[in-house]
Image (cartoon, rainbow, N blue to C red):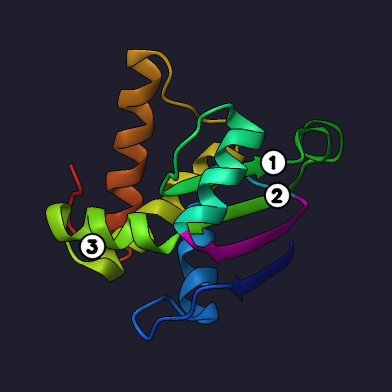
Amino acid sequence: MIFQVSLTKYVRKPYQPKLNQVKSYIRQSLVKKFNALNIDVVIVSAEVSRELNLKYRGRDYPTNVISLEDRSTREEFNILQGELILCDEIIVDEAKIITNIEAHYAHMMVHGVLHLQGFDHIQDGDALQMEDLEVQILKKLGFDNPY
């Protein structure tokens, strides 16, 4: 499988994951088999997250992760292609309550990659399935259950 991942940090902090960690989180998050994978991971500020969340999801607030998938490539060519936009400020704030920063960054990437593969949490049953997958993947990565 062709496996391409890029990492762009518009906000740079020493605790943020390095490219090799990002690749590991993404690789472990693959529940389905693909011919190729091309994911851009971008770490942004709360202001940029809010703008993108409003533009793509119609919600006027920053959020921890936004998954933007090119669905046509997945469905037509079995290529997983998209972007994960992570908001550093939100992830850090949530990590103070939930867990630690490294674990929460890993969780948000796992969560985002599952979205790119077509999983969602709109219905209760789908949410439970997605949470169960997240817990299993995070355990493989050495992190505790975030729920």
Assign the C terminus to one quadrant of the image: top left
- Residue 72 place in picture, x, y as percent: 83, 33
Question: Could you tell me if the residues under marks 1 and 2 are in contact, i.e. CB atoms within 8 Å?
Answer: yes
Give the CA separation, mark 1 to mark 2. 4 Å
Judging by the rendered image, the residue that carries numbered circle 3 is: 143
- Residue 136 highlighted magenta (yes or no): no
Q: Quadrant of residue 53?
A: top right
The label nearer to you, 3 versus 2, is 2
Range covered by the magenta-colored residues? 35-45
- Residue 96 place in picture, x, y as percent: 16, 60
Seen in the picture, residue 129 relative to 39 is either above or below; the reply is above
**Going 43% across and 76% down the picture, which residue do you hit?**
17
Element marked by disc 3: loop
Give the CA separation, mark 3 to mark 2. 25 Å
Of all residues, the one furthest to the right in this rendering is: 76
Element marked by disc 1: strand
Judged by its main secondary structure, the magenta piece is strand
Q: Is residue 41 left or right of residue 114?
A: right
Question: Could you tell me if the residues under marks 1 and 3 are in contact, i.e. CB atoms within 8 Å?
Answer: no
Q: Amino acid at mark 2?
A: Gly
- Density class for disc 3 (Cα within 10 Å; few <14, some 14-19, many ≥20) is some
Q: Is residue 135 left or right of residue 40?
A: left
Pick the residue in front: 46 or 36: 46
Judging by the rendered image, the residue that carries numbered circle 1 is: 69
Q: Is residue 66 left or right of residue 130?
A: right
- Density class for disc 2 (Cα within 10 Å; few <14, some 14-19, many ≥20) is many
The tag on residue 82 is: 2
Pick the residue in front: 22 or 37: 22
